[in-house]
Image (cartoon, rainbow, N blue to C red):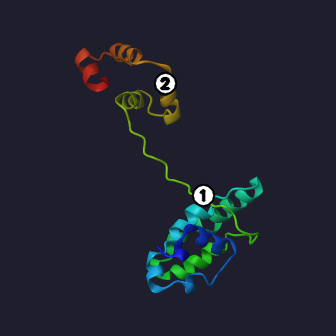
Amino acid sequence: MSEKLSIKSEMAALDSKNRGFYDSLTDDEKKKFATFLMIRYGSCVSGSADMQAYYLQSTNLKLNRNFFAIPKRHDKLNWLAVTTISPGMGNQFHSWISSKKKESTSKVTKFLQGIYPHAKMDDIALMIELNDAKVWKTLAESMGWTKEQIKKELG
């Protein structure tokens, strides 16, 4: 990977509002350049709460809404849009915001979602944490489930 395409140099170009950065890339570098990463890294900075809030709000307002309406062939325009999120107050440390990991759904979770369809996942997770398997089996029995159903559905 070229030195220009390191996230450190890309974020420095963003922070300094270097609008000529994209034009300085070679054709091969332009193919590898991903403006989408600028949203992920650009929105999260270390430092004062005011600076963190500014970058996050600026990214949401200026990039998140219609960023993908601009086609890939217009990466320069995307880059120019990205440079607008910086307040131009020097280089910041930008960190990665990872995507939320998909949680696996256990049999007990599915069981409780069936009983409480309007419950929030946090509430269901708390119920599972506070109770053991015996409670869920007793609940299923009280609902008229057979021992075979309980074994099959709840384990």
Compared to residue 54, the image places residue 142 above or below, namely: above
Residue 37 shown left or right of residue 152 in the figure: right
Q: Are marks 1 and 2 in contact (CB under 8 Å)?
A: no
Tell me what residue is drawn at x 43 percent, y 82 percent: 28
Q: Nearer the viewer, residue 144 or 5?
A: 5
Which disc is residue 77 wearing?
Answer: none
Q: Quadrant of the C terminus?
A: top left
Residue 92: percent from left, percent from top: 69, 64
Q: Which residue is mark 1?
A: 95
Residue 77: percent from left, percent from top: 56, 81
Q: Nearer the viewer, residue 60 or 142?
A: 60
Tell me what residue is drawn at x 49 percent, y 49 percent: 100
Q: Which residue is mark 2?
A: 129
Tell me what residue is drawn at x 45 percent, y 47 percent: 101
Task: For mark 2, give the secondary structure.
Answer: helix
Residue 37 shown left or right of residue 19 in the figure: left
Sequence-wise first label, 1 or 2: 1
- Numbered marks: total: 2
Type of amino acid under label 2 = Glu
Task: For mark 1, give the secondary structure.
Answer: loop
Residue 87: percent from left, percent from top: 74, 69
Q: Is residue 74 among what the camera can see?
A: yes
Q: Is residue 65 among what the camera can see?
A: no
Q: Marks 1 and 2, how far apart in space?
A: 32 Å
Residue 108 is drawn in which quadrant?
top left
